[in-house]
């Protein structure tokens, strides 16, 4: 069924009345809608496809069996992620509410909405630091002499080399010299002191120009989190630029965002393709791609591989952060959300796989050029090391390095910024829905205020020790909370509210039931897998220590606090609800487990006739109906 839309505001005219517990007559504030379906889909794609698709997935694929890793990855994507993605897409579309308000479906767990907004708040806080690094590189790619191409800059050390090839030459020279000195030392022990300095040079660590630009110019990092040092104003400036860019794109909410995504989502695919075509023409690119996809099927049976595949799927998609619910809450009520879930998840998975070809075609060329094996060259090809060290060095070896540097970092800006949009909008819409009368008419000021707050909170990340804060929060803040939130979503929708009830809500929107595999995914497959992930993370999660740095105990305690912080609203809301309800303890739980009076469809016409489906029979019958549907219609 089609809905009429106000041309001037983009607001759906037949939005529902929001019934409160007292008057049942208060009216739901007007909520903007996507102007076109394609804008909504592009926003979903942009939110799900981020920097992790480019710098994390290829490494995980390479480390966990190459092409064989795709088996657990796509199985987790299809059977676990698609059902959960559909759950969030349909939940946001049915209610037209932000994650903070949408859990009126089960008031006992309304803290889950605060959990999602807290996750989005924390990730939004530190994510723009990465965008700042990218912008900094993008600007320097225009310099007549690209600063990471030489060793004659103020930040370079005496042990700087232009590329890995220079390191190999130095090592061979040192080996030859040391062998000569070793012979002399065997015959003349008296000259051992004279040549000792040269002999020790064999153990010197040589850094490439790209590494030193990253470490000593961009980060200017201290020895550890204990030494925060001073604010680095070059990073403060690009951090400000990053937040100004974010604000300008979100200044009119989904109406401006819907126009921006045409560029920020489509352009990266064009640039990825251009870079891939160039990469495939380079000597050694085939070796890199074969190394990337070479299957090691023995690892398919390794439980750890499945856990890493599942974690990558859910972390990359951004489910349980609230962004998917937020984006979908601006949909028209009759939008075909099942197709959206399939397109959103497949776009993320296939983009990850496609980006791997781009990355490893260049790394294969780099390995061939410097005379290293793919195993050796790929050691640094993880996380920031790939984007800010390995790739810039590889681009310098291409003809017209300025062009490729500009294209590559502009692509990263586009990929990163549209992931940030949904996180900011999740926080913004959540705050606006909490205070609808005061803030809904002042969304521009609210967005400006939030961007300012995030910028100020991000300044400590720009200090000499900021990189250690970033790594600590990034390590602890998301994974445990994501698995807990996803598990809670499945339990609430599938078993407390009921999969059959929710299926009928979706049927009201799109005119048909969901596939059986989605029901089974909601009720069994996804919650079991998320429970396994959650328990494994709890059992094995350690601090983000590296070979060169060990985090002190106080930093680990701070990290663990950030891991637990987003989950605190859930038990707090449960206790608050039970204390402020009436009746026996069991009666209070039953009351809070039922939808409150504000729960209902985001359509005035459907609201008038909406009734929540009631289950019949006992527990066994309810399990059967949730899994297989009610045949007694």
Image: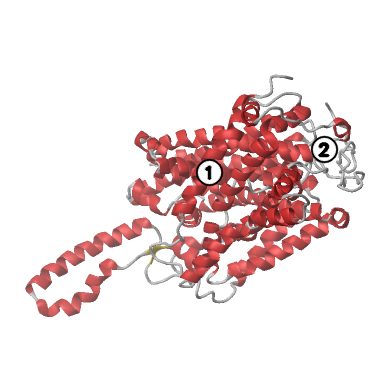
Provide residue 459's location: percent of width, then percent of height.
Answer: 63, 69
Q: Residue furthest left?
A: 187
What residue is disc 1 on?
531
How packed mark 1 is, by other alpha carbons closer than 10 Å (few <14, some 14-19, many 20 or more), is: some
In the image, residue 418 above or below residue 147? above
Q: Residues within 10 Å of mark 2 (few under 14, many from 20)?
A: many
> Helix, strand, or loop for circle 2?
loop
Residues at marks 2 and 1, CA–CA distance in whole angstroms: 32 Å
Q: Which mark is residue 467?
A: none
Front residue of this view, candidates 237 and 607 = 607
Q: Nearer the viewer, residue 311 or 132?
A: 311
Work out whether residue 590 can be spotted: yes
Sequence-wise, which precedes: disc 2 or disc 1?
1
Q: Position of residue 134 (x, y in %)?
A: 58, 57
Quick check: 265 left or right of 594? left
Q: Quadrant of the C terminus?
A: top right
The outermost residue toward the front is 584
Residue 585: give x, y in percent of width and height: 70, 50
Residue at the spot of label 2: 602
Residue at (62% x, 38% y) in the render: 84
Instruction: Work out which residue is located at the far top of the displayed protein and give it.
Output: 632
Position of the N terminus, as image quadrant, is top right
Considering the numbered disc 1 on the image, is that residue within a helix, a strand or a loop? helix
Identify which residue is drawn at 44% across, 51% down: 381
* Residue at x 55% of width, y 32% of height: 79
80 relative to 447, above or below = above
What is the x, y in percent for residue 434? 80, 54
Residue 133 visible (yes or no): no
Q: Residue at x 69, y 63 (%)?
A: 454
Q: Residue 612 falls in which quadrant of the image?
A: top right
Q: Is residue 588 left or right of residue 410?
A: right
């Amino acid at each position: 069924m089609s809905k009429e839309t106000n041309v001037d505001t983009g607001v759906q005219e037949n939005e529902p009345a929001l019934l409160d517990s007292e008057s049942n007559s208060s009216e739901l504030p007007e909520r903007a809608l996507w102007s076109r379906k394609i804008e909504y889909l592009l926003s979903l794609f942009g939110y799900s496809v981020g920097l992790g698709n480019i710098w994390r997935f290829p490494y995980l694929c390479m480390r966990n069996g190459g092409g064989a890793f795709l088996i657990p990855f796509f199985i987790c994507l299809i059977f676990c992620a698609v059902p959960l993605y559909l759950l969030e897409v349909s939940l946001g579309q049915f209610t037209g509410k932000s994650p903070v308000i949408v859990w009126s479906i089960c008031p006992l767990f309304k803290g889950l909405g605060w959990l999602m907004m807290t996750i989005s708040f924390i990730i939004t806080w530190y994510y723009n630091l990465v965008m700042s690094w990218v912008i900094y590189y993008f600007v320097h790619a225009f310099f007549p002499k690209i600063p990471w191409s030489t060793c004659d800059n103020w930040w370079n050390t005496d042990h700087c080399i232009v590329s890995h090839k220079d390191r190999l030459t130095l090592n061979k020279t040192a080996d030859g010299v040391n062998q000569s000195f070793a012979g002399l030392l065997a015959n003349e022990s008296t000259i051992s002191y004279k040549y000792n300095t040269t002999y020790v040079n064999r153990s010197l660590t040589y850094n490439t120009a790209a590494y030193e630009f990253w470490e000593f110019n961009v980060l200017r990092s201290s020895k550890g989190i204990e030494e925060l040092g001073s604010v680095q104003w070059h990073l403060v400036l690009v951090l400000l630029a990053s937040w100004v860019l974010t604000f300008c794109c979100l200044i009119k909410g989904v109406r401006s965002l819907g126009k921006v995504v045409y560029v920020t989502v489509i352009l990266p695919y064009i640039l990825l393709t251009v870079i891939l075509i160039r990469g495939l023409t380079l000597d050694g690119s085939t070796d890199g791609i074969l190394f990337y996809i070479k299957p090691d099927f023995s690892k398919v049976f390794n439980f750890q591989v499945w856990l890493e595949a599942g974690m990558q799927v859910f972390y990359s998609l951004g489910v349980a952060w609230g962004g998917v619910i937020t984006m979908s809450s601006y949909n028209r009520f009759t939008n075909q959300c099942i197709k959206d879930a399939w397109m959103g998840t497949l776009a993320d998975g296939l983009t990850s796989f496609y980006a791997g070809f781009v990355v490893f075609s260049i790394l294969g060329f780099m390995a061939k050029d410097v005379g290293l094996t793919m195993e050796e060259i790929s050691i640094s090809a993880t996380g920031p090391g790939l984007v800010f060290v390995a790739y810039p060095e590889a681009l310098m070896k291409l003809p017209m390095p300025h062009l490729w540097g500009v294209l590559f970092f502009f692509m990263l800006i586009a990929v990163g910024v549209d992931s940030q949009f949904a996180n900011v909008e999740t926080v913004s819409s959540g705050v606006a829905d909490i205070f609808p009368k005061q803030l809904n008419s002042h969304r521009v000021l609210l967005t400006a205020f939030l961007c300012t707050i995030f910028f100020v909170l991000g300044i400590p990340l720009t200090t000499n020790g900021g990189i250690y804060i970033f790594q600590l929060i990034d390590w602890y803040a998301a994974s445990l909370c994501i698995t807990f939130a996803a598990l809670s979503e499945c339990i609430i929708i599938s078993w407390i509210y009921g999969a059959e009830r929710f299926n009928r809500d979706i049927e009201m929107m799109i005119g048909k039931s969901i596939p059986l595999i989605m029901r089974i995914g909601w009720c069994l497959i996804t919650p079991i897998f998320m429970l396994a992930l959650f328990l494994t993370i709890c059992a094995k999660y350690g601090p983000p220590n590296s070979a060169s740095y060990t985090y002190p105990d106080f930093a680990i305690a701070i990290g663990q606090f950030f891991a637990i912080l987003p989950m605190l609203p859930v038990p707090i809301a449960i206790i608050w609800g039970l204390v402020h309800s009436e009746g026996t303890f069991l009666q209070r739980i039953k009351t809070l487990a039922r939808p409150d009076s504000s729960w209902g469809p985001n359509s005035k016409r459907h609201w008038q006739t909406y009734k929540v489906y009631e289950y019949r029979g006992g527990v066994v019958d309810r399990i059967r109906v949730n899994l297989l549907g009610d045949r007694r219609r």
